[in-house]
Image: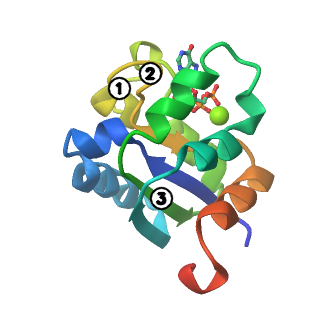
Amino acid sequence: MSDITFTMIKPDAVQDGHIGAILSKITEAGFKIKALKLTQLTVDDAKKFYAIHSERPFFGELVEFMSSGPIVAAVLEKENAVEDFRKLIGATNPAEAAEGTIRKRFARSVGENAVHGSDSDENALIEAQFHFSGREIF
Ligand code: IDP
Ligand code: MG
């Protein structure tokens, strides 16, 4: 699978009722949905998913937030998916995110920032496989 990325609509955006609007923005931007589910991370899942950030000062807060409520997990396909999706979501901190980006429109804060987007092709595949079995990806 090349040209795929992995995303989560995070607990803040699910709770704020933005699932539909965010999925619309994603598909309108030309991404095809290859896998999709509403699920919730356990504390242990969140620790594993964000293990790369375990030494960062916000790690505890991040794990607590990401396991605090349901999320939408999805695998997306498009040419240049990883880079184009990072552009669509905008900067980590919504205060610094460009106009028209998903985080600018929907994020609450730097921590509760509405969506995840993979940072490389390699991580997109790892993250997709973390959340989905082969038969759930179309
Ligand atoms: P990214 O999601 O834009 O790739 P990363 O630096 O990979 O940003 O950080 C992962 C997640 O950790 C962010 O999306 C955000 O939820 C959280 N995070 C990042 N920096 C901070 C911070 O300074 N305070 C609180 N949470 C943060
Ligand atoms: Mg990241």
Q: Confirm whether residue 69 shows in the render.
A: yes
Q: Looking at the image, is 1 positioned above or below residue 65?
A: below
Q: Residue at x 31, y 49 (%)?
A: 22
Q: How is the image coloured?
A: rainbow
Residue occupying the far left of the picture: 17
Q: Are marks 1 and 2 in contact (CB under 8 Å)?
A: yes
Please state if 107 lies on the left or on the right of 116 as rendered. Answer: left
* Residue behind mark 2: 97
Q: Residue at x 59, y 23 (%)?
A: 60
Earlier-in-chain disc, 1 versus 2:
2
- Label 2 SS: loop
* Mark 3 crowd level (few <14, some 14–19, many ≥20, 10 Å Cα): many
Q: Residues within 10 Å of mark 2 (few under 14, many from 20)?
A: some
Residue at disc 1, secondary structure? helix
Based on the displayed image, in which of its 4 quarters is residue 62 positioned? top right
Most distant residue in the bottom direction? 135
Looking at the image, residue 11 lies above or below residue 70? above
Tag 3 residue: 73
Q: Nearer the viewer, residue 90 or 125?
A: 125
Q: Are marks 2 and 3 in contact (CB under 8 Å)?
A: no
